[in-house]
Amino acid sequence: MKLKAAWNRVTQDNKGRTIIWQWPNKLLIGWVLLRIASHFLHAGSLKNGFGFLGNAFLFTWAYLEIIEGASYFRRFLGTAVIIAVTVGYFMS
C-alpha cells in the first residue's frame, strides 16, 4: 500500500487529480515556434537569436515547473529539462 501512496504523491496534485500531461502553455508554444523558425533560417545572428530565445523560453518553463509544478513528476521534469538545457548550452 505504501508504494501506491508514494506513486499517488508523485503523480497527483493536492486535490487528488492525476497531473502528468497538460496542454502546453505559452512558454512551451513559444519555444516550439522559435525552434521551428530557427531551423528555417540560414546560419547567422537571427538564427542564433531565435535558438537562444527559444532556449530561454524552455528554461523559464522548466524553472516555473520546479517551483510551482502541480506534482512531483512535473517538478522532476522541470529539473531534468533545466539540466539538459544548461548542459546543451555549455556543450555547443
Image (tube, rainbow, N blue to C red):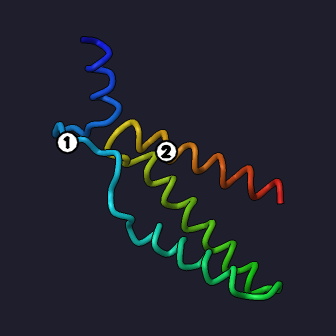
| Residue at x-position 70% and y-position 52% | 86
Locate residue 43, reporting x and y percent.
82, 84
Q: Is mark 1 on a helix, strand or loop?
A: loop
Residue 72 appears left or right of 53: left
Q: Is residue 2 left or right of residue 51?
A: left
The answer to whether residue 44 is above or below residue 31 is below
Q: Quadrant of residue 8 in the image?
A: top left
Q: Which residue is drawn at 57% across and 59% down?
A: 59
- Label 1 Cα crowd, 10 Å radius (few <14 / some 14-19 / many 20+): few
Residue 39 versus residue 55 in the image, above or below: below
Amino acid type of the residue tagged 1 in the rendering:
Arg
Per the rendering, the mark at residue 77 is 2
In the visual, does 22 lie left or right of 64? left
**Label 1 – label 2 distance at C-alpha:** 18 Å
Give above or below for 55 relative to 47.
Answer: above
Residue 66: x and y in percent read: 46, 46
Residue 73 screen position, x and y as percent: 41, 38
Determine the residue positioned at 68% across, 74% down.
51
Residue positioned 46% across, 69% down in the render: 27
Give the quadrant of the C terminus: bottom right
| Callout 2: SS | helix
Q: Which label's residue is closer to the chain start, 1 or 2? A: 1
Marking on residue 29: none
For the N terminus, the image quarter is: top left
Q: What residue type is labelled 2?
A: Leu
Which one is nearer the viewer's eye here, 60 or 32?
A: 32
Q: How crowded is mark 2: few (under 14 residues within 10 Å), some or many (20 or more)?
A: some
Where does label 1 land, which residue?
17
